[in-house]
Image (cartoon, helix red, strand yellow):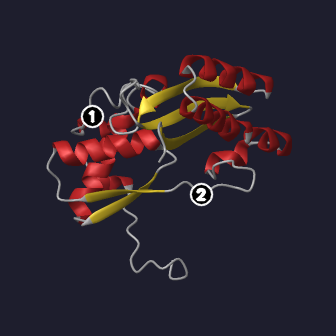
Amino acid sequence: MIAAGAELLFTPTPELIYPKGLAQQTFIEVPDIGDELCGASRPGHFRGVATIVAKLFNIVQPDMALFGRKDFQQLMVIKTMVEDLSMPIEVIGVDTIREASGLAMSSRNGYLTADEKHRAATLKRAIDGVITAVQHGQDHHQAIAQAEQQLKAAGFTPDYFELRSADTLRQASENDNHLVVIAAAYLGKARLIDNVSFSRHPK
């Protein structure tokens, strides 16, 4: 902990966080933004995320909180919750750390075999391909279809692969300049997620 630069570590037990048990727990839901993408694949997931994060914020009373951009939807859910509930907390997104291949680092990578881990880098390459297509004015639907075929050829089973507004996470329109390509796909026993934010018209 000290080597990582931390001065205090808070590790509450389930009994402290949920003294009445989950059945009697008040929940927080962030509508719309938490219902799509990973929320559609895992119903109720972001309700749990919003609830536990809100409880931790109330216990710790932080001035700021840092969350990884790798789970972009989770970051947006937490930012929306903080804004909607007028919490005096600055939520900061931390850039994704990647391996040399481009694969986003994650505990889920431990489920990959050596061969699967080599092929897993295809997810980032597929995302980059869509970004290049969009920035060159190409139709993003066609680019995404090609990306999904690229993933399937590498052994993935795509869950979703979409172009969204990086500000609202809604479906991207032609007027949106700040965009995110966000994707999830299964490879072997692992469900991998990744995303990259970019400008449609880079300066």
Q: Are marks 2 and 1 in contact (CB under 8 Å)?
A: no
Pick the front one: 172 or 20: 172
Q: In the rendering, at what x and y percent does residue 18 appear?
A: 29, 48
Q: Is residue 183 visible?
A: yes
For image coordinates 81% across by 43% down, the residue present is 118
Q: In the rendering, at what x and y percent does residue 72 appear?
A: 45, 42
Secondary structure beneath disc 2?
Answer: loop
For image coordinates 71% across by 34% down, the residue present is 189
Q: Which residue is mark 1?
A: 30
For image coordinates 38% across by 77% down, the residue present is 8
Q: Which residue is mark 2?
A: 97
The image shows residue 60, relative to residue 49, as above or below, that is below
Q: In the rendering, at what x and y percent does residue 38 appear?
A: 47, 30
The image shows residue 32, relative to residue 5, as above or below, that is above
Secondary structure beneath disc 1?
Answer: loop
Q: In the rendering, at what x and y percent does residue 165 appear?
A: 39, 33
The image shows residue 99, relative to residue 8, as above or below, that is above
Q: Is residue 18 visible?
A: no
